Image: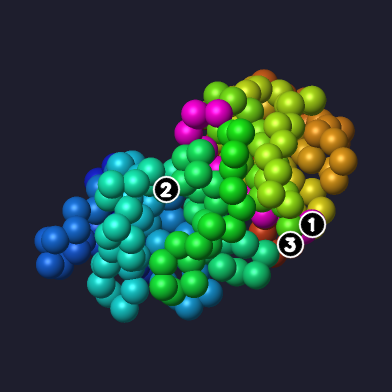
């Protein structure tokens, strides 16, 4: 669990704050958590740093990023590799030896990227705080605006060929060719959508400001 106070783990009957025992890496204001296929937990902080927690220890996998645009969103690719969004620089993957540019993002306005996702066709999508939604494919950056409920896009969730989109003004879905609200309950139409999750029974769970 990511909290303002730091990283918290639920262990049976209680919540335990997990600290860096060396005290060298402050772990506060946790905004994102992603588990990789090797079992490590990646922790995204408000100051755009990313820490890795594995085998009971924290480490900084990107010490050279201190002077460069940091990570504002992270997820995994279709193949299970880590995928990071770095401001207007694009999407980067990590293969154990540093960051590698996966999809450049020329043309994305200077608006923080709040969520990043890869759909089944290989496209990388970037959701911004105030400039809308962008699709990165074949070296090109395309703004996807038609049908988008709000320019502030908080969360993306790829499911098959679809991309579920949570905004400050309701929810929508990219169906492979266009953004649509077909099939989405009207009760979600005006809510601020903050999180999306699909469970093993194929149910879609929606977290809102209410």
The residue wearing badge 1 is 121
Image-based side of 141 in relation to 89, left or right: right
Was residue 115 drawn as part of the magenta stretch in this picture?
A: yes
SS for dot 2? loop
The residue wearing badge 3 is 201
Observer-nearest of 133 and 18: 133
Does 115 appear above or below 21? Answer: above
Question: Residue at (74%, 57%) from the top-left corner?
Answer: 122
Quadrant the C terminus occupies: top right
In front: label 1 or label 3:
1
Question: Residue at (25%, 72%) from the top-left corner?
Answer: 57
The residue wearing badge 2 is 71
Q: CA distance from mark 1 to mark 3?
A: 23 Å
Observer-nearest of 190 and 114: 114
Q: Which residues are magenta?
A: 109-121
Q: Are marks 1 and 3 in contact (CB under 8 Å)?
A: no
In front: label 3 or label 2:
2
Residue 206 location (% of width, % of height): 63, 41
Residue 70 location (% of width, % of height): 38, 46
Q: Which callout, 1 or 3, points at the residue further toward the start of the chain?
A: 1
Quadrant the N terminus occupies: bottom left
Does 174 appear above or below 91? Answer: above
Does 54 appear above or below 32? Answer: below
- Dot 1 crowding, Cα within 10 Å, few <14, some 14–19, many 20+: few
Image-based side of 87 in relation to 62, left or right: right
The mark total stands at 3
């Amino acid at each position: 669990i990511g909290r303002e106070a730091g990283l918290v783990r639920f262990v049976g009957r209680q919540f335990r704050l997990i600290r860096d025992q060396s005290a060298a890496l402050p772990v506060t204001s946790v905004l994102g958590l992603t588990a990789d296929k090797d079992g490590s937990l990646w922790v995204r902080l408000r100051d755009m740093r990313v820490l890795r927690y594995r085998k009971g220890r924290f480490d900084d996998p990107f010490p050279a990023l201190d002077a460069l645009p940091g990570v504002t969103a992270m997820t995994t690719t279709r193949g299970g590799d880590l995928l990071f969004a770095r401001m207007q620089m694009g999407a980067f993957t990590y293969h154990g030896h540093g960051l590698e540019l996966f999809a450049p993002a020329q043309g994305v306005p200077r608006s923080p990227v709040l969520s990043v996702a890869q759909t089944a066709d290989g496209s990388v999508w970037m959701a911004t705080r105030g400039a809308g939604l962008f699709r990165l494919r074949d070296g090109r950056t395309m703004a996807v605006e038609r049908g988008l409920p709000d320019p502030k896009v908080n969360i993306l969730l790829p499911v098959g060929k679809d991309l579920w989109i949570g905004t400050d003004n309701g929810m929508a879905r990219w169906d492979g060719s266009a953004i649509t609200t077909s099939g989405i309950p009207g009760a979600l139409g005006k809510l601020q959508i903050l999180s999306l999750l699909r469970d093993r029974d194929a149910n879609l769970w929606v977290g809102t400001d209410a």
